[in-house]
Every structure is written in structure tokens, then in C-alpha cells.
Image (cartoon, rainbow, N blue to C red):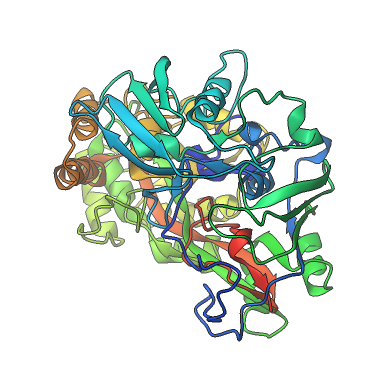
């Protein structure tokens, strides 16, 4: 999630573009006693039973179990325990089937038939094509602000139809080769046909691995194992979500035995406890892109030589070490390291101050002064700004760091200023391009406006062969690497703490993907 304008900090869900289905890990049912946990070790026999208590930052009295309103990490973790989507994102951010058993496009890529697997809601009724259409039409309601609305925009929901009980024909407004990403979109959960708004917080009915027991907004939610779950009953008897907004409160609850799972720890905490034996630290790699965004439509960054100079000013490892306390890996000015379609064959950029000075001189910007907007809205932002200011000074560039409001930062930097601190959570590379790099993208923070680039995106979306489509995405990324507006200096770990008794926590899934907060595959040793 870029932290989208209007979303609260804790919900930086990859921003939505969906997180989803990983290659399923530990998918054996409760009789599986191999003992091989997703944490990679042998933990003795898999044990069924018990209640796991998970601490998340919450949203106070306004919290809801309506899955179509899920913005915060806590909202999404609860939603995925109670509900399912048609697809979800794997650890490489490719869409993987969930309630959908498969999908097939027509030759023009503007009609897709989606087949549903046999699955039941918690009340015993089967999940049908009509439930899918009801859910998507509810999300698309023009009077509501549901999270997945923008993601579902390519679908003509009036023309789409139920072919039979377990087949949906989606009619699209244009050819869309990456349509499975729409099915996996953040917040695109399937609910029973006819569900009213009031039903969600009284007794929500989903098709997920846990059933509703109780909910106190801003305090806790308790769910119980769904023995009839289509993907195998959870190992836990019960799952409780506890709200603890301060990181210190989550850590202390974990250390004190009040919870067994603490979400979103900072790098300093992780370093203090890692390998000490009291708790386990889980690092979800490549979970958050860290960048500086240069606005390419205005001076000084309307000159691609200045943008290249800034690429070469950055000492990426120093930024990782100083701003993220070492909890991450260096970036290469492209989004999505390790994700499907990522252009990993490009040379890793290194700091080259001499070359940077030469480029600035050629651009007539030898004594350049620029303002860098930052804020305490996200961990490491103010530290990164200070470090980059000092790096730029070595190239003769004066960077003035300007602190912005935590409450309005994302809206403030979208259209104003010239250079800003930026981050994004996990989403498919295709979604990153469509949301942030097309001329009409609504969150185009670098003001990258190029009709030929737009045309390449539409070419990719109308290319059925995956290898040929990957080649087009590769061309687009080479262009961004050479002259784009995102100086992507790193990818931060997302850090979770667990009790030593907690097993089966997936360690390769970026935050917001299917196997993040996958409590149906966790057990207590």
C-alpha cells in the first residue's frame, strides 16, 4: 500500500491493489502431523486446539467487520478470517485461485468466465454466482466508498451474469489480460446475496476459516474454527484479535504472555529481541517499497538528467542502515522487487557522485536547491530525509527538509511540491503501473505523463501470451529505470513477533498477501 490519501497510517495495505494468494503452504488438514512448519523447522507434531490471541493496532469505536470497508491491517486480518475472495496474491504477487477454482478469457480478453469451487457459507448455504455478483455490485455502489471500488472499475457489472450456479461471466469495458488481479483486489470479499449493512457487526456470515463469536469495536473480536472450511479446518479452536495501538503495548503484551502474536513491530524492537529466546521475530521481506518521488512535470525534475543525477546521489545501503535500522534490502529504482514481471536483469545502481555532478552541470543545475517534503507519517521517513540531505550535499545539491502533517501528508504531496518521501506496500507490478504511472492515474505522485508509456500498458493488457506480456512490462520498466520519477532506494521488512509456541507462520509472504496473517494455518505447540 502506498499509504493512499484518505487512509489511516495503519492501513497502509498495499494499498490496495490487492494482496493475495500465495502458493499455499502447510495446507494439510488437521490430521497432518508431519510437524514441518512454514517457519522452516521441525516443531514436533502438529497440534490441534487452543486459542491464539493476536494484537493489532486498531481503529477505535468506528471499527467494523464489514469486509468491504477494510482499510486497517486489523480490519483485513479479521476479514480474511471470516470471508474469502475469488483470488488472492501469492508471495510473488501473482493472483492465485481461492473461491474461484479457475478462470478463462475469450480471445479478445474482454470476457472472462470464472468457475467457483464447491464452498459453503457459515450458515450452510453454498457460495454461488449470484453471491459473487451481489458482492461486486455492493462494492461498486456509487453512493458508498468501499475499498475495492476502483479495482472493480474494469467490470461492466450490468452486463455481467451468472451462467449457472457456479459460473460467472464477467463482461469487461476493455481487454484486460491481468483480470485475475481484479478478483484478488483488496477488499473484494464475497458475502451472501442479500446481506444488509447491519448484518456485519451483529452476526457476519462468510465462507472463511473461522466463524463469528463476538465483536467489541476498538477492543476485541473472537472467532471459532469452521470445521466445514473448503480449504481444511483451522488447527486452532479459537482466534481472538486484541486491539493495542501502541507498539510498546503490543510488545509488552507478547512478552507478558497476554498475546501470542504481535503485528507491526519496529526494527529497533526486533533487533533487541531477535535470537534472545523469549519471543520469535518474523521478517516479511519486500513488504514496503521505500522511495523518493520526483515530480517529472516541473523544474528541476522535468529534466531527465537531473533525475538520473539524483539516482546516482543515493547511497542506498546507508539509507537502509540509517532509516530502517538495517531491516530491508536495497532497491534499484523500480517497484516490486521479487514480484511477478520484475525486471531483475538491470544493473544495480550504486552511488556515483562524480557522474551526478557532471549530469547536474550539463543540466545547468550545478548549485541546485530543492525542498524535500517528509513527515513522521511512516517509520523511517524523517531519518531518510536527513540522510539523503547529507548525501546530496556531497554532490553540491542543497536539500531543504520540510516536515508535513501526519494527518494530511499523502494528500498534500500528491500534487504539490517537487520531491517527497514515499512508500508503498505489496501489490502487483501491473497494479502499481495502472494506479501510479499512467497519464490518468489518480495517485500519480511523480506526474509521469507519457502517452507512449500508456500505450505500452494497454498493449500488455491486450497481450494474451504471458511471455510476450512479460516482455512488454520489461520494456516499460527499462524506461522507468532510465528516466522515471521514483528513486526507489529500498524495500523494508514487515516485522511480526510471536510467542515461541506459535508455529506455522509463513515467512516468505509480503504483508497484505494471502499467507500474511494466515491464522487458519497456524498452530500452538
Between 50 and 307, the one lying in front of the other is: 50
Q: Position of residue 285 (x, y in %)?
A: 47, 63
Relative to 506, residue 364 above or below: above
Image point (28%, 36%), residue name: 104
Between 338 and 502, the one lying in front of the other is: 502
Relative to 493, residue 245 above or below: above
- The quadrant in which residue 187 appears is top right
On the picture, is 30 further left or further right than 299?
right
Image point (75%, 29%), residue name: 199
On the picture, is 204 further left or further right than 256?
left
Q: Quadrant of the C terminus?
A: bottom right
Q: Position of residue 479 (x, y in %)?
A: 20, 41
* Residue 295 visible to an observer of this rendering: no
Image point (61%, 33%), residue name: 191
* Residue 118 visible to an observer of this rendering: yes
Q: Position of residue 356 (x, y in %)?
A: 27, 52
Amino acid at each position: 500500500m502506498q499509504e493512499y490519501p484518505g487512509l489511516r497510517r495503519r492501513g497502509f495495505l498495499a494499498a490496495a491493489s490487492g494482496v493475495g494468494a500465495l502458493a499455499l503452504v502447510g495446507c494439510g488438514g488437521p490430521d497432518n502431523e508431519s510437524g514441518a512448519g512454514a517457519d522452516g523447522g521441525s516443531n514436533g507434531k502438529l497440534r490441534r486446539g487452543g486459542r491464539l490471541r493476536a494484537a493489532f493496532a486498531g481503529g477505535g469505536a468506528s471499527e467494523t467487520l464489514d469486509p468491504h470497508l477494510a482499510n486497517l491491517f486489523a480490519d483485513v486480518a479479521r476479514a480474511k478470517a471470516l470471508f474469502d475472495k475469488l483470488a488472492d496474491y501469492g508471495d510473488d504477487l501473482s493472483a492465485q485461485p481461492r473461491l474461484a477454482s479457475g478462470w478463462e478469457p475469450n480471445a479478445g480478453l474482454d470476457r472472462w468466465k470464472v468457475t467457483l469451487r464447491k464452498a459453503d457459507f457459515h450458515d450452510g448455504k453454498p457460495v454461488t454466482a449470484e453471491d459473487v455478483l451481489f458482492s461486486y455490485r455492493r462494492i461498486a455502489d456509487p453512493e458508498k466508498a468501499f475499498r475495492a471500488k476502483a479495482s472493480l472499475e474494469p467490470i461492466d457489472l450490468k452486463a455481467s451474469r451468472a451462467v449457472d450456479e457456479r459460473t460467472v461471466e464477467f463482461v469487461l469495458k476493455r481487454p484486460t489480460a491481468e483480470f485475475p488481479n481484479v478478483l484478488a483486489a483488496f477488499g473484494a470479499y464475497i458475502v451472501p446475496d442479500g446481506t444488509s449493512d447491519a448484518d456485519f457487526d451483529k452476526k457476519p456470515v462468510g465462507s472463511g476459516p473461522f466463524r463469528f463469536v463476538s465483536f467489541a469495536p476498538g477492543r476485541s473480536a473472537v472467532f471459532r474454527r469452521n470445521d466445514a472450511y473448503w480449504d481444511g479446518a483451522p488447527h486452532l479452536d479459537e482466534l481472538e484479535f486484541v486491539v493495542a495501538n501502541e507498539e510498546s503495548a503490543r510488545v509488552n503484551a507478547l512478552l507478558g504472555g497476554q498475546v501470542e502474536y504481535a503485528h507491526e513491530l519496529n526494527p529497533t524492537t526486533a533487533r533487541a529481541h531477535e535470537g534472545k529466546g523469549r519471543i520469535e521475530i518474523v521478517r516479511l521481506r519486500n513488504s514496503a517499497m521505500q522511495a523518493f518521488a520526483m515530480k517529472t512535470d516541473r523544474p528541476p525534475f522535468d529534466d531527465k538528467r537531473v533525475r538520473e543525477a539524483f539516482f546516482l546521489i543515493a547511497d542506498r545501503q546507508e539509507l537502509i542502515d540509517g532509516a530502517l535500522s538495517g531491516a530491508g534490502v536495497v532497491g534499484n529504482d523500480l517497484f516490486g522487487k521479487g514480484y511477478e514481471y520484475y525486471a531483475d536483469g538491470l544493473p544495480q545502481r550504486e552511488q556515483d557522485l562524480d557522474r551526478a555532478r557532471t549530469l547536474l552541470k550539463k543540466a545547468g543545475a550545478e548549485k541546485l536547491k530543492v525542498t524535500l517534503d517528509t513527515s513522521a507519517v511512516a517509520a523511517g521517513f524523517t531519518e531518510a530525509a536527513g540522510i539523503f540531505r547529507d548525501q546530496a550535499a556531497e554532490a553540491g545539491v542543497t536539500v531543504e527538509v520540510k516536515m508535513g502533517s501526519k494527518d494530511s501528508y499523502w494528500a498534500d504531496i500528491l500534487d504539490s511540491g517537487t520531491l517527497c518521501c514515499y512508500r508503498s506496500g505489496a501489490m502487483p507490478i501491473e497494479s502499481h503501473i495502472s494506479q501510479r504511472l499512467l497519464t490518468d492515474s489518480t495517485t500519480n505522485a511523480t506526474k509521469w505523463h507519457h502517452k507512449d508509456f500508456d500505450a505500452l500498458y494497454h498493449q500488455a493488457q491486450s497481450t494474451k501470451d504471458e511471455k510476450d506480456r512479460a516482455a512488454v512490462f520489461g520494456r516499460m520498466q527499462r524506461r522507468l529505470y532510465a528516466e522515471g520519477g521514483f528513486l526507489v532506494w529500498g524495500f523494508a521488512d514487515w516485522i511480526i513477533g510471536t510467542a515461541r509456541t506459535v508455529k506455522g507462520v509463513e515467512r516468505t509472504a509480503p504483508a497484505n498477501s494471502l499467507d500474511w496473517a494466515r491464522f487458519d494455518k497456524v498452530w500452538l505447540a
